[in-house]
Image (spheres, rainbow, N blue to C red):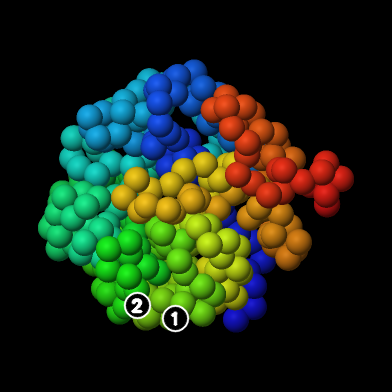
């Protein structure tokens, strides 16, 4: 299949990128400023926060304040992670445009991550999706460990397809396929997508690939060839998974944009503004950007 003409980036930095930051809580003002800067890059989808228990994810304790403080831009969808009814109700009150639920293709990872089996997780999501539908709020589904699990190793593509199908049948408009520990390779990614696409149309799938072994861009190119046209990424490569030791985190939005620009694929996103945003948030967090493009010389970065 030919490469898509356009790709939609789903920006994860404000939620997935910040939720596991160690140390003191990141200020609400920094989160709001990050989202506002991202809103001005041309992005159409920004996952802004997560309505979860502050006991488990203290960095997301100010979810309502973040949603109340951002300057919403026309044409930008601001979404939030809502694992249960309590979280969804809070998200609705905060005026989110879209919500997400998350499951796993691995039983062991599901138990470690959300303390229940895969089947039980689907049962939990059913009332969440039903209530969201009543409020005309779209629901996105995440499936973790699609190319490998830190506890079980390789995951059979058919298991991934089964979980994706369950979420799709429940009413998730889009399923994001997560290589949580970043052990996937291009051929594995193609085989996984082949199995999943028998259950869920490729047009309703997204790729969420981590870069632990430096394979994220190669894997993304592989699934772009198979028709994927939605990519999850995180500015400056922020984020990771606390239940996947050694996972180096999300692929950087800047690096994905650089690759897509080089392929002649339209995104509507300004690479230079994204690079500047990555530098800014990295400075706020006291670290270097995780983007290779952002760390290149200025003349290289603009090409």
**Left-right relation of 91 to 207:** left
| Residue 26: quadrant of the picture | top left
> What quarter of the picture does the N terminus occupy?
bottom right
SS for callout 2: helix
Image location (x, y in percent) of residue 71:
53, 24
Residue under the point 14% across and 54% down: 116
Q: Residue furthest front?
A: 246
Q: Are marks 1 and 2 in contact (CB under 8 Å)?
A: yes
Q: Residues within 10 Å of mark 2 (few under 14, many from 20)?
A: many
Residue 269 visible at all: yes
All told, the count of numbered labels is 2
Tell me where residue 166 appears, x and y as whole percent.
24, 67
Q: Earlier in the sequence, mark 1 or mark 2?
A: 2
Residue where numbered disc 2 is placed: 157
- Give how far across and how far down residue 202 sits, in percent: 46, 71
The residue singled out by tag 1 in the image is 191
- Seen at 33% across and 64% down, the residue is 149
Q: Which residue is found at the position 44% from the left and 81% from the top?
A: 191
Q: Report crowding for label 1: few under 14, some 14 to 19, many 20 or more residues within 10 A (C-alpha).
A: some
Is 193 rendered above or below residue 173? Answer: below
In the image, is 301 to the left or to the right of 62?
Answer: right
The residue that appears at 26% across and 28% down in the rendered structure is 54
Where, by quadrant of the figure, is residue 262 drawn?
bottom right
């Amino acid at each position: 299949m030919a490469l898509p003409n356009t790709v939609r980036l789903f920006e994860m930095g404000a939620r997935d990128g910040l939720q596991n930051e160690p140390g003191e809580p990141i200020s609400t003002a920094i989160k709001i400023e990050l989202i506002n800067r991202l809103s001005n890059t041309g992005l159409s989808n920004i996952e802004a926060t997560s309505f979860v228990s502050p006991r488990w994810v203290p960095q997301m304790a100010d979810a309502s304040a973040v949603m109340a403080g951002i300057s919403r831009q026309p044409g930008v969808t601001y979404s939030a992670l809502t694992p249960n009814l309590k979280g969804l109700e809070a998200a609705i009150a905060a005026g989110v445009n879209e919500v997400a639920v998350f499951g796993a293709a691995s039983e062991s990872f599901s138990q470690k991550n959300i303390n229940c089996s895969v089947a039980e997780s689907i049962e939990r999501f059913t009332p969440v999706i039903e209530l969201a539908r009543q409020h005309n709020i779209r629901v996105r589904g995440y499936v973790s460990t699609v190319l490998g699990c830190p506890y079980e190793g390789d995951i059979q593509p058919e298991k991934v397809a089964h979980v994706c199908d369950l979420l799709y049948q429940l009413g998730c408009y889009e399923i994001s396929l997560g290589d949580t520990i970043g052990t996937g390779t291009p051929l594995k990614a193609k085989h996984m997508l082949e199995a999943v696409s028998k259950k869920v149309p490729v047009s309703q799938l997204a790729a969420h690939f981590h870069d632990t072994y430096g394979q994220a861009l190669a894997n993304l190119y592989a699934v772009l060839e198979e028709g994927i046209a939605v990519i999850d990424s995180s500015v400056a490569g922020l984020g990771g998974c606390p239940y996947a030791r050694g996972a180096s985190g999300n692929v950087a939005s800047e690096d994905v944009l650089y690759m897509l620009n080089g392929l002649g694929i339209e995104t509507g996103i300004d690479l230079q503004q994204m690079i500047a945003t990555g530098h800014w948030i990295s400075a706020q967090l006291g670290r270097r950007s995780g983007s290779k493009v952002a760390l290149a010389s200025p003349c290289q970065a603009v090409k």
